[in-house]
Amino acid sequence: MNESSKQNNYNEYDNFAFHPYNILLVLLLSSIGALFIAFSAAFVYTRVQSGLPPVKLPNLFFFNTFVLLTTSVAMRSGKFAYKNDKASVYQRALFVTLLLTFLFLGLQISAWMQLFDRNVFLTTDNSASYLYLLSGLHFIHVVAGLPFLFSFLLTARKRLKEPVSGLVYFSDPAKSLKLRLLSIYWHFLDGLWLYLLLFFQINYWFS
């Protein structure tokens, strides 16, 4: 009887760590991390073997780090607002995150243009190729997260117009789970960018 009662009361959202969506995200992030580490190791090996100097990063790479970290702060603010049922703050945080993400992408394109102005192209040498490859892969993964962020913002604007629908929205465990997963993905991209920045800068300092 007790066993049957436990089965009836089972909620798939109670244990986040073992939820299928979370497991899929962990596998995805592990794969992305392994990909970047493999390319980083290949870059170091190729650079040492060929004796090529690394490329100096444009200053926009460093400013863009601040922009990306700010998106993480905005995302965290949105998650906190969701937990506390603050509809206007939640929507504002999502909008700011989206806006800053587009700013990051635009500035990243500008940073590549600065490299072009210095005659550093994808085909210049292996050092340049790996810089474009790794920063380009990060760019693609940021773009891949945009539809999910945009979907959250549109749904929030639609569902939070009325108090009743807002109450249902904030008490939806599926929505809470997906927001948490999106937040983890965004923080992971921030960490990945910091890793790339330090990796290329350390290679430049010790070349």
Image: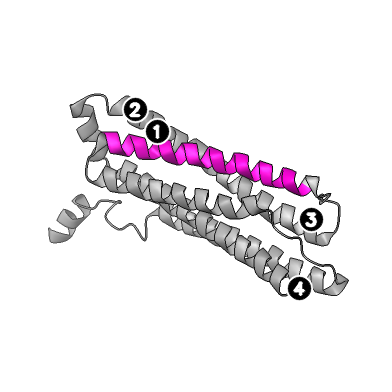
Residue 15, located in which quarter of the rendered image?
Answer: bottom left
Main SS class of the magenta portion in the image: helix
Closer to the camera in the image, 130 or 168: 130
Q: Position of residue 76 (x, y in %)?
A: 36, 50
Query: Along the polypeptide, which appears first: circle 1 or circle 3?
Result: 3
Q: CA distance from mark 1 to mark 2?
A: 6 Å
Give the label on residue 157, or none: 2
Q: Are marks 2 and 4 in contact (CB under 8 Å)?
A: no
- Horizontally, residue 56 falls left or right of residue 15, namely right
Label 3 sits on residue = 129
Q: Which residues are magenta?
A: 88-115
Q: Are marks 4 and 1 in contact (CB under 8 Å)?
A: no
Instruction: Name the residue type under label 1.
Output: Leu
Q: CA distance from mark 3 to mark 2?
A: 42 Å
Which residue is painted at 47% across and 54% down in the image? 25
Check the image and report above or below for 1 versus 161. Answer: below
Helix or strand or loop: what does disc 3 sit on? helix
Crowdedness of circle 2 by 10 Å Cα count: few (<14), some, many (20+)?
A: some
> Which of pointers 4 and 3 indicates the residue nearer the eye?
4
Check the image and report above or below for 42 versus 116. Answer: below
Label 1 sits on residue = 153
Instruction: Name the residue type under label 3.
Output: Ser
Closer to the camera in the image, 20 or 28: 28
> Is residue 68 shown to the viewer in this render?
yes
Helix or strand or loop: what does disc 4 sit on? loop
Give the label on residue 207, or none: 4
> Which of pointers 4 and 1 indicates the residue nearer the eye?
4
